[in-house]
Image (tube, rainbow, N blue to C red):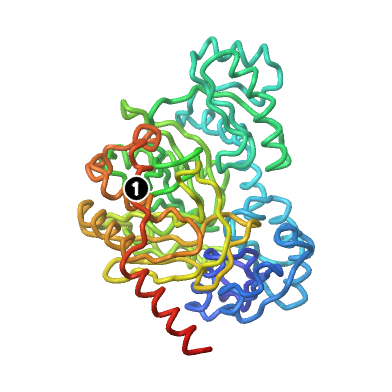
Amino acid sequence: MAQIGSLMFKKILVANRGEIAMRIIRACRELNIATAAIYSEADSTGIYVKKADEAYLVGPGPVKGFLDKQQIVDLALRIGADAIHPGYGFLSENAEFAELCQTSGITFIGPSPSAINAMGSKIKARDLAKEIGVPVVPGTEGGVTDMKEALAFAKEAGYPVMIKASAGGGGRGLRVVRTDAELRENMEVASREALAAFGDGAVFIEKYVERPHHIEFQILADKHGNIIHLGERDCSIQRRHQKLIEIAPSLILTPKLRAEMGASAIQIARAVSYDNAGTVEFLLDQDGRYYFMEMNPRIQVEHTVTEQITAIDIVRNQISIAAGKPLDIQQSDVTLQGHSIQCRINAEDPRNNFRPCTGTITAYLSPGGIGVRIDGAVYKDYTVSPYYDALLAKLTVRGRTWEETVSRMRRSLEEYVLRGVKTTIPFMKAIMQDQDFRAGRFDTSYLDTHPDLYSYDDVEQPEDLVLAISAAIAAYEGL
């Protein structure tokens, strides 16, 4: 196990798949650290499997192997890996897994089990924020199982209110209700959904803030008590409380408000002796008041936009911090340069309530040029299975100004060819051309208040025709 002040790790087991596995493997390669991937039979041809130095089949099934704590730790011990990086999802926020790594002499690249426990429950996290004076949205004290208590809170706070799962995220176990009848109808449903998704059916209720901005601050904290933030991301453009587009920095934060919210984020992290990368999430209402929501004790999907405007490699820092090295960056070193946008390229049909789509990628051509970044693990002939998240790739662009960044994203999306399954690409193109988005007029209600976005043009572009003709010629010559 790497100790404070030790050299970097020799081998890291990447306990994840897809684009985040590729992201971790790339960081390890730059640090001259060997990598071991794990995969299911459904992922046997994955790019990340080929790019890792070693790869091992785990099972059973396409998902259970990624959740089998003991199997993963035993594998790490058997192959001589001295650290495990969990990425996001799967076991990344599992305190028991972090503890098992620790007791087995393997470094978990993430926060301590106690910090995960403290932040893993939204109820505990809210209570902690209140104790240290960070504003929170008015809500129930602890979990709620009694309907009378739920109705009493809703009457006092006033509708609308939000039912939220204490554990987990991603919009699961979350319901916005506006009447007593809706509250009665959704309490049990939300609890069952939370239990199925996270193994914990506890829910709580809080006042629903209408049309806020969803603002999150990226934290880096080492094992020596140094904590900094890398500025904020605006994640307001969501469907079903799941993020679609993220930007950095926010277009509405003043330097004063950024400093205040950043200080609150650091305060939260320090209160649980946090180390490694994490994200503190806030709601910002229309009057400029902010409220703590939760802390995610892991790397975030959208970390790319922060890296683009700060030139700070967050995954590399995760590994360095876990190895016991002090941060080599101070808060005064963090400067936010330009603007960045990330679009999640999902195998989903926006016109059909973002229904996940499966199939085989028949044509693939990624965009390029100045300020364009692709994080993905798909290619021509890649099979999009029903077993995993619909995220195929992340397209991130950077520009000097907001206008330049939006134009660059629009151009990049026009270049992006990904055929064989329906994706969010044409929907993202429609957003980049929307007048309100280009003017920075958006909040969490944006998609609901812009139904015209779903009338996008989904015809094949000329470059798709060229690809199709080339494929046909190649097939003919191969006969």
Within 10 Å of the Cα at label 1, are there few (<14), some (14-19), or many (20+) other Cα atoms? some
Point out residue 423 in the picture as x, y percentages from the top left corner. 46, 56
The residue that mark 1 highlights is 456
Give the vertical position of 262 relative to 402 (above or below). Answer: above
Can you tell which quarter of the image residue 461 is in?
bottom left
Kind of residue at disc 1: Tyr
Give the vertical position of 347 relative to 235 (above or below). Answer: below
User: Residue drawn 23% across and 56% down?
Assistant: 407
Q: Helix, strand, or loop for circle 1?
A: loop
Point out residue 310 in the picture as x, y percentages from the top left corner. 33, 60
Left or right placement of residue 220 versus residue 111 in this view: left
Can you tell which quarter of the image residue 204 is in?
top right
User: Residue drawn 63% across and 24% down?
Assistant: 186
Point out residue 433 in the picture as x, y percentages from the top left corner. 26, 48
Left or right placement of residue 220 versus residue 223 in this view: left
Can you tell which quarter of the image residue 311 is in?
bottom left
User: Residue drawn 58% across and 24% down?
Assistant: 205
Left or right placement of residue 389 versus residue 246 in this view: right
